[in-house]
Amino acid sequence: MQIAPNQLPNDIDALKALVSDQAIKLNDFTARNEQLQSKVLILQEQLNLALAKRYAASSEKISPDQVCMFDEAETAVDEAPDTDDDLIIVPAHTRKKRGRKPLPDNLPRVDVIHDLPESERRCDHDGRLLTEINEVISEQLDIIPAKIQVIRHIRNAKDIGQLGIDTHPGTPSCSCYLSPCGDPV
């Protein structure tokens, strides 16, 4: 509340009372100001702590003073004598067969035979007819809505027969016995 200079009393006692009133108000305002300043500092510290928790690095840092705390366990282990009493004998066990389980036998099977065309059934080197030596079967599950079946892919492997004489496995009579990658055809 401002008092205009022309409204100030001319009496000295009234002026003294006015000055003491103003001094008391000033003390109240400074005390309130100090309280608010301390509250602002506390709130600023809480904000800084919250920001540090949210955005600061989250890894644990070890101060150099704390490194020696972890040496005690290592020295205790180094001092312990080695004993053979700690050996554990594990009995042998069997493992489960790896790979895909066979498809159920009760499903109907459709055979799709992949065979060489007539033009490729002869040896490129001597023209002899290739004979069947093996059959490779792979099964594929085919699900048709309201119908389930197994499609079997059968590939006939061919070899050159020498006039009915059975050749020893692994000693082909011709180089066409092997496919380009080295597998039997």
Image (cartoon, rainbow, N blue to C red):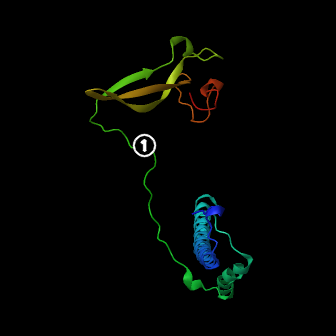
Instruction: Give the x, y percent position of residue 12.
Output: 65, 78
Question: Which of the 4 image quarters holds residue 184?
Answer: top right
Q: Is residue 21 above or below residue 179?
A: below
Could you tell me which quadrant the C terminus lies in?
top right
Of 3 and 92, nearer the camera is 3
Task: Find residue 149 and report its horizontal and vertical position in percent.
Answer: 31, 29
| Residue at the far right in the pictured view | 64
Report if residue 57 is visible in the image.
no
Residue 127: quadrant of the picture: top right
Q: Position of residue 24 (x, y in %)?
A: 59, 77
Residue located 39% across and 43% down the image: 101
Q: Is residue 17 visible?
A: yes
Which residue is at the front of the view, 146 or 35? 35
Q: Position of residue 132 (x, y in %)?
A: 49, 25
Image point (51%, 18%), residue name: 116
**Quarter of the N terminus within the rendering:** bottom right
Callout 1 secondary element = loop
The amino acid type of the residue labelled 1 equals Arg
Question: Which of the 4 image quadrants contains residue 33?
Answer: bottom right
Question: Residue beneath label 1, please?
Answer: 100
